[in-house]
Image (tube, rainbow, N blue to C red):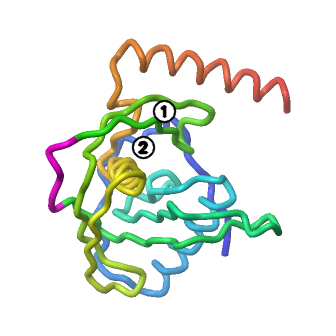
């Protein structure tokens, strides 16, 4: 497995609608494994293919991960190929979100409380998951990436402008530290 480069805002690939995957094969599974390793190493809970420079409708998520004590993250990874939301609750919830592509920043985002998602799994078999709470938020966040939407696109212009100023300051501080 290989760690992949995570692209950061404002890279143009993050604004593109990703292409549907035509077949699930060993090459795609290797890519999924690399995405999962990249996500764990960055201590994220989800990662979409566009975030690593690949415009495909592929997401990896592990909303139940833990550190195994030896510096590795383990949990219950989910591999979602061509995911689509087929049902949403009327109720919505607000939660604080961050993103590996918008480092060091967080904001409150409104999402559907419950969703049902249909997708192909690691072996190319069709699956469905009914998600609520944290998993529903993570799924919606990662699936937004497949349509070129970042969580910062779902907050007010004022909050987004403030967040982007903080992001610029965060990047300057990182440059000074390195």
Quarter the C terminus occupies: top right
- Residue 74: % across, % down: 64, 71
Question: What element does badge 1 sit on?
Answer: loop
Per the model, the C-alpha gap separating discs 1 and 2 is: 7 Å
Question: In this rendering, would 60 be left or right of 2?
Answer: left
Task: Report the residue marked by disc 2.
Answer: 14
Quarter the N terminus occupies: bottom right
Query: Is residue 89 inside the magenta stretch?
Result: yes
Which label sits on residue 10?
1
**Mark 1 neighbour density, 10 Å: few (under 14) some (14–19) many (20 or more):** few
Q: Quadrant of residue 71?
A: bottom right
**Residue sitting at x 48%, y 87%:** 26
Q: Nearer the viewer, residue 116 or 84?
A: 116
Give yes or no for contact between labels 1 and 2 (Cβ–Cβ under 8 Å). yes
- Residue 36: % across, % down: 57, 67
**Mark 2 neighbour density, 10 Å: few (under 14) some (14–19) many (20 or more):** many
Q: Quadrant of residue 135?
A: bottom left
Question: What element does badge 2 sit on?
Answer: helix
Give the extent of the magenta segment.
86-91
Q: Quadrant of residue 159?
A: top left
**Residue sitting at x 78%, y 27%:** 175
């Amino acid at each position: 497995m290989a760690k992949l480069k995570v692209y950061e805002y404002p890279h143009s690939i993050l604004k593109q609608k990703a292409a549907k995957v035509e077949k699930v094969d060993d090459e795609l599974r290797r890519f999924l494994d690399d995405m999962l390793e990249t996500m764990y190493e960055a201590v994220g809970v989800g990662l979409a293919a566009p975030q690593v420079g690949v415009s495909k409708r592929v997401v990896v998520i592990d909303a139940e991960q833990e550190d195994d004590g030896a510096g590795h993250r383990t949990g219950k990874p989910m591999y979602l190929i061509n995911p689509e939301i087929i049902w949403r609750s009327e109720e919505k919830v607000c939660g604080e979100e961050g993103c590996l592509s918008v480092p060091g920043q967080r904001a409150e985002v409104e999402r559907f409380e419950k969703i049902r998602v249909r997708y192909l799994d690691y072996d190319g078999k069709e699956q469905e998951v009914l998600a609520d709470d944290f998993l529903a938020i993570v799924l919606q966040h990662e699936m937004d990436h497949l349509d070129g939407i970042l969580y910062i696109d779902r907050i007010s212009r004022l909050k987004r402008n403030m967040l982007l100023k903080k992001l610029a300051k965060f990047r300057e501080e990182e440059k000074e530290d390195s």
